Amino acid sequence: MTAAGTSGPQSWRELYKLAFVELDPAKLPQRINEARVAILDRIEKTLNNPDNVEQQMLNDALNGLRVLRQEFDRRLQRYGELRAQADISADEVSFVGRKSA
């Protein structure tokens, strides 16, 4: 689900996709968090009636978000404070392009 009081996609799948295509490093942690919360909510709702295929997709999505967050944290350590999208260097644009492909 999205943060309280905001409108937008409700599906964990949509929120997951939005996290992976977010280009603004200042917004990425929030996108990751929203997707993670939505995935965990869905896991909780399906505990009594698990669907193995969906459970695997949810697990894969959580792992994907974990990797995305680790990459974000590494880049933050390497380059310092968050910068606006307009300030992204050519190297960072290349990195973002590879991750969203």
Image (cartoon, rainbow, N blue to C red):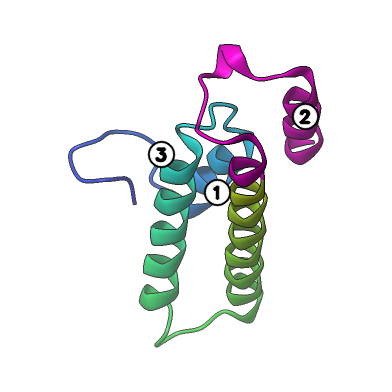
Q: Nearer the viewer, residue 82 or 48?
A: 82
Q: Residue 56 lies in what quarter of the image?
A: bottom right
Residue 16 circle label = 1
Residue 94 circle label = none
Residue designated by label 3: 9
Give the percent coordinates (x, y) of residue 5: 18, 38
Magenta span includes 79: yes
Q: Residue at x 63, y 56 (%)?
A: 70
Q: Is residue 68 above or below residue 25?
A: below
Q: Residue at x 55, y 42 (%)?
A: 19
Q: Earlier in the sequence, mark 1 or mark 3?
A: 3
Please tell me whether mark 1 sits on a helix, a strand or a loop.
Answer: helix
Q: Nearer the viewer, residue 59 or 63?
A: 63
Residue farthest along the top direction in this orientation: 86
Residue designated by label 2: 97
Q: Earlier in the sequence, mark 2 or mark 1?
A: 1
Please name the amino acid that badge 1 sits on: Tyr
Please name the amino acid that badge 2 sits on: Gly
Q: Residue at x 61, y 46 (%)?
A: 77
Numbered range of the magenta stretch: 75-101
Magenta span includes 93: yes
Q: Earlier in the sequence, mark 2 or mark 3?
A: 3
Report, in whole angstroms, how far the alpha carbon at label 2 lies from the one at label 1.
17 Å
Report, in whole angstroms, how far the alpha carbon at label 2 lies from the one at label 3.
23 Å
Q: Residues within 10 Å of mark 3 (few under 14, many from 20)?
A: few
Q: Residue 46 lies in what quarter of the image?
A: bottom left
Left or right of 72 on screen, residue 94: right
Please tell me whether mark 3 sits on a helix, a strand or a loop.
Answer: loop
